[in-house]
Amino acid sequence: MNALDIAPRLITLEGGEGAGKSTVLSALAQALRAPGYEVVTTREPGGTPLAERIRELLLHPDNADAPTADTELLLMFASRAQHVASVVRPALARGAWVLSDRFTDASHAYQGGGRGVDRTTIAMLESRFVGLQPGLTLLLDVPVAVGRARAQGRASSNSVQPDRIEAEADGFFERVRSAYRDLAAAQPRRFRMIDASQPAERVAADAVAALDDYLQGLPQG
Ligand code: Z5A
C-alpha cells in the first residue's frame, strides 16, 4: 500500500452532526485570507458538480433501496476521488490553502466506526484513490445529544426532513464520536480536538488559535 503524502496546506474539519463546522470554516477562511493567502473552501461528500450529485444519492432519505454499508463507502470514495482530482490537488499545486468540511477521516469514523466496515478496506481505498493526508485536522467534539439537538433545531426552523444518515439512531452517532476520538488520539500531531459544546464564538476562537499554532510550527515560505 502506498504511503499518504502529507499536504501542509490542506486543513480539514471533522465532527459529528451539529458540531458547528460551517461556522468554524468561515472563521478559519477569514483568518487565512487576512494575510493574503488564496483559500479554497470545499466540502465532502461533494465539492464538484459530479461529487455533489453523488452526495444527493448518498443522503436521499428514501430508504426503499438504501445503499448497503459497502455501497455507501464506495460512493463516499467516488465523490472523494473526483473532489481530490478536480479541486484539492489543483488548488494545492498552485499554492492555495484548502479548507475542507470533512475528508477521509469521516469515512473512517462513519463507515468504519458507525457501520463497522473494516479499517483495512478503508485504508486501501484511501491509499489508492486519495493519496493525501491533511497537515491539520480540527476535530470539533460535542456530545451526541447536544449536536443532535442543534441539528434538529435548525431542521425544524428551516422545515426540512433529516437526511438518510441524520435519521440514524443515537448509538450510531456514539460509535462515530468514539471512532473520531480514537483517530485523534492515534495521530496527535495532525489532530487538534476542540470542545465544540462551548458557545459558537468560543469554538471559532479556539479553532483560530489552533490554526495560528499550526502556522507557527510550519517552515517559512
Ligand atoms: N459522511 C460520511 O458518512 N462519510 C464520509 O466520508 C463523509 C461524510 C465525507 C453529510 O455531511 C453526511 O455525510 C454526514 C456525515 C456523512 N452525516 N451526518 N450526520 P455534512 O458535513 O454535510 O453533514 P452534517 O455533519 O450533518 O452537517 P451539520 O449538522 O450541518 O454540521 P455542522 O456543519 O458541523 O453544523 P453547523 O451547520 O455549523 O451548525 C448546525 C446548527 O447548530 C446550526 O443551526 C448552528 O447555528 C448551530 N450551532 C453551531 N455551533 C453552535 C454552538 N457552538 N452553539 C450553539 N449552536 C451552534
Image (cartoon, rainbow, N blue to C red):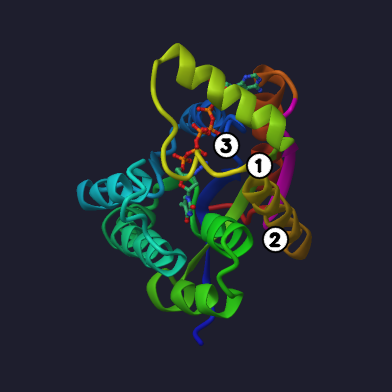
Three-letter code, disc 1: Asp
Residue 209 in view, yes or no: no
Residue 142 relative to residue 35: left or right: right
- Indicate whether 3 appears above or below 133: below
- Indicate whether 157 appears above or below 117: above
Q: Which residue is mark 2?
A: 183
In the depicted view, which residue is nearer to us: 19 or 98?
Answer: 19
**In the image, residue 13 lies at what x, y percent?**
56, 44
Residue drawn at x 40%, y 61% is 72
- Indicate whether 124 appears above or below 145: below
Residue furthest to the left in view is: 49
Distance Cα–Cα, label 1 vs label 3: 11 Å
Residue 72 in view, yes or no: yes
Q: Which residue is mark 1?
A: 170
- Magenta stretch in the rendered image: 190-197
Magenta segment: does it hold 195? yes
Residue drawn at x 46%, y 21% is 155
SS at mark 1?
helix
In the depicted view, which residue is nearer to us: 95 or 88?
Answer: 88
**In the image, residue 202 lies at what x, y percent?**
72, 21
Question: From the Cβ of disc 3, is ligand 1 less than 8 Å away?
Answer: yes
Distance Cα–Cα, label 1 vs label 2: 20 Å
**Quarter of the image holding residue 61?**
top left
**In the image, residue 7 lies at what x, y percent?**
51, 61
Other residues around mark 3 within 10 Å, as few (<14) / some (14–19) / many (≥20): many
SS at mark 2?
helix
- Indicate whether 121 appears above or below 30: below
Q: Nearer the viewer, mark 1 or mark 3?
A: 1
